[in-house]
Amino acid sequence: MMLLVRRVEERLSSLFSDGEVPGFIHLSIGQEAVAAGVGSALEQKDTVASTHRGHGHALAKGIELDSFFMEIMGRDTGMCRGRGGSMHVADMSVGMLGANGIVGAGIPLAVGSALAHQTRGNGAVAVAFFGDGALAEGVLHESFNLAALWKLPVLFVCENNGWSEFSPTSRQFVANVRDLAGAFGIESEQVDGNDGEAVALAAAAHVEAARAGGPRVLECITRRVRGHYEGDPQKYRDDGDADPQSDPLARSIARLRAAKVSDTDIQSIETDLMSEIDAALSAARAAPPADFRAARADVYSPGSAA
Amino acid sequence: MTEMRFGKALGQALEDAMAADDSVMVFGEDVAAAGGPFGVTRGLLEKFGPVRVRDTPISEATLVSAAVGAAMSGLRPVVEIMFMDFITLGMDGLVNQAAKARFMFGAQSSVPMVLRTPHGGGLSAGPQHSQCLEAWFAHVPGLKVVCPATAADAYGLLRAAINDPDPVIFVENKSIYARKEQVPDVLEIVPIGQARTAREGRDATIVAYGAMVQTSLEAANTLSEDGIETEVIDLRSIQPWDEKAVLDSLSRTHRLVIVHEAVEAFGVGAEIAARMADIGFDELDAPIVRVGAPFMPVPFAKPMEDRYRPDSNRIVDAVRRVLA
Ligand SMILES: Cc1ncc(C[n+]2csc(CCOP(=O)(O)OP(=O)(O)O)c2C)c(N)n1
Ligand SMILES: [Mg+2]
């Protein structure tokens, strides 16, 4: 999964520079272990509300690669028919309730989704992904309280990359997410968010705890390797180059090697992925453009008076 | 016919909707144990229990967005915002999430939520507990906005709103919660988007919604004493609004007055007037006149508030103007 997210985003990056992907894209390169680790702990019925940096979360929740590329390239056959783009990738059929263009907005959506799971008694869990920048948003504080008060089956995953757009989050937020969780009586854990296995193990434990009733907080310390958005000149950045040792993908591959997975096997996974991506991209290039009239007709449900 | 209060009709709609569909739930501040700040939700907790009827903390932003998330995950939540003024805190959930979800996700999901909220003055509740902000929401593609004028419509429109697959802002005028009315023994669902002719008349058309329908009827009675017969169209739904009903009436009377309690400038009346000046231009024998609140916050002191809110005298004057 990590490899998939990495290669997909690298491809998006070059498509963006070539002008094939319009708008803003926010890549999660360097943060893939969070999406992959948490995703590995989820079932199909579980739901995820995500952020502007949500490609990895969406892929890890099981969205389909073809319609993902089609969406980001603005095609009619895209998962959202070309109406949302990178910041709104969503697939209700796999419980991906959407990336989100509004910082923090996914948090109360996940709380509401957890409320539905609890009320319907379906045993599902909702996950809210959010960045450290969202810690200063009021809805986070409200949502921690409501989730704890109602013992909702929700896992809050803070993807802490230290940056909030062009500012270090330390200049914006005086507390930290674990103390905040503690104030609401929510159990929390901090993990190395660049260690896929650690994230997966922690996520599995907390997802099951949340499923049994009551929110949990998982803080994943990670690094935003790229700019805030593609094309960000990053003049503000003073935190040095990424340490190749801490790259989550390199670490996972090293772990596979240590577990005696052969280079040929690793290479063949990579080759398969690349041909999947190539196929998805060709399909997206060949796909019809987004349809304005259909979009206009989808503001309200069919048969509705508006 | 039986007698029923406007507020009771709303409560009855919630009760019947909850009985008919397990996925309907109600939450908001003081709606469960206390039965709602205006008593609308009284008895629901006892009938349906604390899982489906919930008191919440004072967290409007999260309540609104949680309703969106719940609606996207299989429930039909009815969330109450205690005063429409407090909806400012829930704007993201409504405007960026609920309104966009269906469109933005390529029609994969709809958001079958209802947000109930009281608007309007008359209680000397002051600038932050009296506003009529419905035009804000009518301006946002993806939201529906309704505002009943009668107890029967309060019931029928609320049932329709709960059944509706899209997000509906259900606006209740707080000055009429306690008003008693005659209603049919069997209350019916009222489709969203269809206006009602509250009074027939040949000389001029008044379009109004919510509490202003009654005020407009009073004005029509006064005018009738002078032989002026005014048609009163109760809009019932603001978004979508029944353009055809308004145009049909205008085509008979050729004169149009639009009345609302909300501030006149940039309001619902402006949209209706602009539209009728376009598609109804050939029918018009006089300029379209609006009656709304002046461009100022709602004042507290009783005499000031009385002067602020449109009353039947102002409506009578407006009708005389279009007939002059
Ligand atoms: C409500 C809101 N305010 C501001 C923005 C602009 N903005 C987009 S991303 C971002 C920083 C978010 O930082 P963080 O949550 O840590 O996520 P990261 O980009 O690090 O993944 C800001 C300020 C926005 N999209 N929404
Ligand atoms: Mg960040």
Image (cartoon, coloured by chain):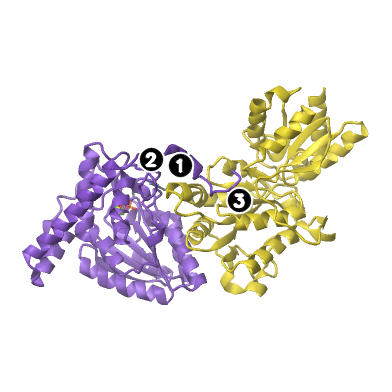
Chain colours: A purple, B yellow
- For label 3, count other residues whose C-alpha is less than 10 Å away and answer few (under 14), some (14-19) or many (20+): many
Find residue A247 and report its image quarter: bottom left
Q: Which residue is mark 3?
A: B169
**In the rendered structure, are the residues bearing label 1 and label 2 in contact, judged by CB atoms less than 8 Å apart?**
yes
Quadrant for the C terminus of chain B in the image: top right
Judged left or right of residue B191, residue B111 is: left
Mark 3 or mark 1, whichever is nearer to me? 1
Judged left or right of residue A59, residue A292 is: right
Q: Amino acid at mark 2?
A: Ala
Position of residue A94 measured from the top left corner of the image (x, y, whole percent): 37, 61
Question: Would residue A143 be seen by someone viewing this image from the given angle?
Answer: yes
Instruction: Specify whether disc 3 shares its chain with disc 2.
Output: no
Question: Disc 3, ligand 1: is the CB inside 8 Å?
Answer: no
Mark 1 vs 2, N-terminal side: 2
Question: Which residue sits at x=80%, y=60%?
Answer: B4
Q: Amino acid at mark 1?
A: Ala
Position of residue A207 measured from the top left corner of the image (x, y, whole percent): 35, 72
Task: Give how far apart the Cα atoms at labels 3 and 1 are.
Answer: 23 Å
Question: Which residue sits at x=76%, y=51%?
Answer: B150
**In the rendered structure, are the residues bearing label 3 and label 2 in contact, judged by CB atoms less than 8 Å apart?**
no
Q: Amino acid at mark 3?
A: Ile
Quadrant for the N terminus of chain B in the image: bottom right
Position of residue A222 measured from the top left corner of the image (x, y, whole percent): 24, 59
Q: Which mark is residue A290?
A: 2
Question: Which residue sits at x=43%, y=54%?
Answer: A105
Question: Disc 2, ligand 1: is the CB inside 8 Å?
Answer: no
Label 3 residue SS: strand
Q: Which residue is mark 1?
A: A295
Question: Would residue B291 be seen by someone viewing this image from the given angle?
Answer: no
Judged left or right of residue B303, residue A12 is: left
